[in-house]
């Protein structure tokens, strides 16, 4: 760490020199490390002449620079940072010039030292709070420049990923109280050193990863991890950081010895080795690109708050563990109490982790989530013989959301008498893009704002049914606050409800002829009406009139018009049913509907494709799957949608469903080679090689060439199918294709050294 600290000071010194003197001189900086002199950021060793000049500059007792005869260079010893600076002038410098630069270099060095003190924690030499946040802002900019993900195939450039790890030393206050702050400081130093060593080990094995470590204050640490890497890798590395702390005493004997060599630690009473057990809890938050209208500062605040929330959950759940923010809502909620008189359930998660009004959860009794091991003991050894079963008690729906807790009621009408024990586990039911529709008004659900009734879906749907029965064509428009949750955190529920009430009044006033207006959920309003009264141009004018009133809430509009089905010349609206108009317009108003920043979106099949593609890009596979299943129920089906759904199921680990979806898509479009190579990828993963080859072998030679250029992963999968067929003696084996394709795969830079090609190499030897 001392070496890294010195290098950073030297780089700050170089920056200051370049800023002040770049137009006058060229500079080089030399430092001593490991029994030799080195030039900053230059791997080659200094020449003997340069080393001689360095030594002469260091030997000058009067602190004057060394100036070789007939040279335009001068060598200055810098005591503030313990280095030697070489300045090369345009002409041979005179003494007056050298004195001037000597003074200026002293000022520059002091500025560099002060800059370092501001930028780094002086105890651990890790990035200080402001420096870490500044670096995080740059990483957010880098991540927001989203890489292109293929919308049709498994091939994609690895997405950019950014995560923040918030760490806290468990029970650190007890360490300080028991052994004193001086000993506690040494624990912090070694804790920081181990984090740096672990980060270095990770970076050496993964060229694309960048890791920065910060120490804002006390026992709190922050780590940013970024690169073209998977979320799974980051979670694995988070556990590496955790085990680097807890796997051996901290500090170890060798670590304490090194600390003692640098300063006198004799006054400190050191605990016995077996008492130096230190653990850390870690909260992980991933950055998800959010609207460009959100400032970088708010993005920084949001991801740091999410990481801190995950850290709090890790500590409250037993410490010495890693918890992801995204998992808190899905898997980490617990029941606090169940009031059997009112049938109200209090749960320990709230708005801070994304709980929404109308959120649904499955409830599992303590220990019966399908994860707890069943162990037996004979008095000497304990062994696992199975796991406790997964038992679902009931389903609950949230009706009141607060920052750190929520209240719910049992929504399963067949299990309203169920008694729920404290500590029961919650599992969120995925909703997809359009959130929680409040389908009815009950005593548990408060009025959203003023006299606006929440849950008017039944009334809106009744209006549609009556008009369709009468032969009238209808439209549905959803007005949605896309930044409702950000606004809620910033201003509170009262302000959000007032905005919703204002929007309700404006919409009701504008659509007052043969229409019906209602509140769908905590952030959106729907109007349905006869489409003879609908005008696209009038809607645009109305939107622009509203936009300025709700600028922070980022108003979006989703539209579905029944008349568009009749005028559709192609197939982008085929199969859509007017009875689902509200659902279509809700999807059109969702964050993932448009490829651009369109604020008014008309629903069609392409919008559905956009939604699933967006979920896939964000790695929100379960949400994307929930969207697909919901869209399918309301008549939205297409070959493209089935293909993307197959990719989502595949990425989520359900290879068999993925294969079935690809197969159905092929039946719709038998000439699409991408569908066939995607199908082959899925069948390979479930070892159904004959099934895969029956489809892959129908590819023409031209299509195989296209696959090699446009879907290399699918091409590899076909070659692997053939390799397996040869090894297993399957009838579907095609020797000619195998020889050509195997040679091409082995020549591909992406795969020639991959463990996957072992089967190909083995099959070639048979």
Image (cartoon, helix red, strand yellow):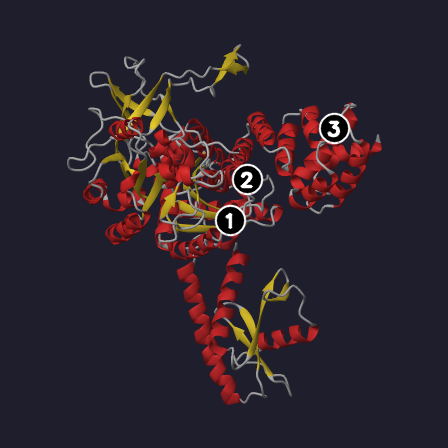
Q: Position of residue 525 (x, y in %)?
A: 27, 38
Does residue 310 sit above or below 457 in this rendering? below
Q: Nearer the viewer, residue 41 or 391?
A: 391
Disc number for residue 233: 2
Instruction: Give the mark nearer the N terminus: 3 vs 1.
Output: 1
Q: Secondary structure at mark 3?
A: helix
Depth order, front residue of 226/746: 746
Above or below for 581 versus 182: above
* Residue 312 in view of the camera: no
Question: What separation in Å lies between label 1 and label 2 (alpha carbons)?
Answer: 11 Å
How far across and down, in percent of the image, does residue 34 sit? 62, 60
- Whether the residues at callouts 3 and 1 have beta carbons within 8 Å, the answer is no
Query: Is 137 placed left or right of 671 in the picture?
Result: left
Packing grade of label 2 (10 A; few <14, some 14-19, many >=20) is few
- Among the two numbered marks 1 and 2 on one chain, the one whose residue lies closer to the N terminus: 1
Q: Nearer the viewer, mark 3 or mark 1?
A: 3
Residue of label 1: 226
Q: Earlier in the sequence, mark 3 or mark 2?
A: 2
Looking at the picture, tell me which residue is in the foreground, 118 or 174: 118
Q: Which mark's residue is nearer the viewer, 3 or 2? A: 3
The reply to whether dot 1 and dot 2 touch (C-beta < 8 Å) is no
Q: Quadrant of residue 178?
A: top left
**Residue 380, position as x, y percentages in the image:** 54, 13
Residue placed under numbered mark 3 in the picture: 724
Disc 1 is placed on an element classified as strand
The quarter holding residue 171 reads top left
């Amino acid at each position: 760490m001392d070496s890294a600290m010195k290098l950073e000071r030297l780089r700050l010194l170089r920056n200051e020199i370049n800023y002040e003197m770049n137009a006058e001189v060229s500079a080089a900086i030399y430092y001593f490390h490991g029994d030799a002199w080195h030039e900053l950021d230059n791997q080659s060793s200094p020449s003997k002449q340069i080393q001689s000049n360095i030594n002469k500059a260091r030997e000058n007792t009067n602190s004057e620079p060394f100036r070789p005869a007939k040279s335009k260079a001068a060598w200055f010893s810098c005591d503030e940072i313990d280095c030697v600076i070489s300045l090369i002038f345009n002409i041979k410098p005179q003494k007056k010039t050298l004195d001037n630069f000597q003074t200026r270099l002293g000022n520059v060095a002091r500025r560099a030292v002060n800059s370092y003190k501001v930028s780094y924690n002086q105890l651990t030499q890790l990035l200080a709070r402001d420096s870490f946040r500044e670096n995080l802002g740059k990483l957010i900019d880098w991540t927001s420049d989203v890489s292109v993900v293929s919308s049709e195939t498994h091939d994609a450039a690895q997405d950019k990923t950014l995560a923040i790890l918030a760490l806290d030393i468990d029970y650190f206050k007890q360490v300080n109280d028991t052994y004193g702050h001086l000993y506690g400081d040494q624990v912090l130093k070694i804790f920081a050193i181990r984090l740096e060593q672990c980060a270095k080990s990770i970076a050496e094995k993964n060229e694309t990863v960048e890791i920065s470590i910060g120490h804002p204050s006390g026992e709190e640490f922050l780590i940013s991890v970024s690169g073209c890497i998977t979320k799974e890798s980051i979670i694995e590395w988070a556990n590496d950081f955790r085990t680097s702390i807890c796997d051996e005493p901290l500090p170890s004997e060798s670590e304490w010895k090194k600390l003692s060599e640098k300063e006198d630690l004799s006054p400190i009473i050191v605990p016995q080795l077996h008492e130096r057990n230190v653990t850390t809890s870690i909260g992980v938050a991933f950055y998800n690109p959010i609207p460009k209208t959100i400032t970088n500062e708010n993005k920084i605040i949001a991801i740091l708050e999410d990481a801190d929330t995950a850290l709090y959950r890790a500590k409250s759940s037993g410490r010495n563990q890693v918890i992801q923010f995204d998992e808190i809502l899905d898997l980490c909620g617990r029941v606090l109490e169940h009031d059997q008189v009112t049938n109200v359930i209090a749960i320990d998660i709230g708005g801070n982790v994304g709980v929404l009004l109308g959120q649904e959860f499955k409830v599992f009794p303590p220990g019966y989530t399908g994860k707890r091991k069943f162990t037996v003991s004979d008095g000497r050894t304990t062994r696992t013989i199975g796991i406790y079963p997964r038992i679902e008690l009931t389903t609950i729906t949230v009706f009141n959301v607060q920052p750190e807790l929520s209240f719910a009621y049992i929504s399963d009408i067949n299990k309203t008498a169920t008694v729920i024990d404290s500590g029961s586990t919650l599992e969120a039911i995925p909703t997809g893009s359009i959130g929680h529709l409040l389908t009815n008004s009950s005593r548990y659900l408060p009025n959203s704002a003023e006299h606006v009734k929440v849950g008017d879906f039944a009334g809106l749907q009744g209006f549609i049914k009556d008009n369709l029965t009468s032969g009238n064509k209808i439209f549905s428009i959803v007005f949605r606050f896309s930044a409702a949750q950000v606004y809620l955190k910033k201003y509170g529920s009262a302000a959000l409800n007032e905005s919703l009430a204002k929007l309700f009044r404006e919409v009701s006033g504008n659509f007052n002829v043969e229409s019906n207006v209602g509140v769908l959920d905590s952030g959106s309003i729907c109007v349905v009406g006869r489409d003879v009264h609908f005008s696209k141009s009038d809607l645009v004018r109305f939107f622009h009139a509203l936009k300025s009133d709700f600028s922070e809430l980022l108003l979006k509009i989703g539209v579905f018009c029944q008349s568009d089905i009749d005028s559709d010349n192609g197939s982008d609206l085929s199969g859509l049913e007017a009875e689902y108009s509200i659902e279509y317009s809700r999807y059109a108003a969702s964050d993932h509907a448009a490829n651009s920043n369109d604020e008014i979106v008309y629903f069609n099949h392409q919008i559905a494709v956009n939604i699933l593609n967006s979920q896939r890009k964000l790695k929100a596979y379960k949400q994307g799957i929930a969207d697909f299943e919901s869209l399918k129920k309301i008549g939205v089906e297409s070959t493209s949608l089935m293909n993307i759904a197959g990719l989502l199921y595949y990425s989520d680990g359900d290879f068999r469903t993925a294969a079935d979806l690809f197969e159905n898509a092929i039946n719709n479009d038998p000439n699409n080679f991408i569908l066939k190579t995607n199908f082959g990828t899925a069948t390979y993963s479930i070892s159904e090689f004959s099934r895969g080859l029956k489809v892959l072998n129908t590819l023409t030679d031209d299509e195989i060439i296209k696959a090699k250029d446009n879907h290399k992963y699918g091409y590899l999968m076909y070659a692997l199918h053939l390799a397996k067929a040869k090894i297993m003696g399957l009838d579907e084996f095609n020797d000619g294709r195998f020889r050509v394709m195997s040679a091409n795969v082995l020549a591909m830079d992406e795969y020639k050294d991959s463990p996957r090609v072992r089967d190909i190499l083995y099959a070639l030897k048979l």
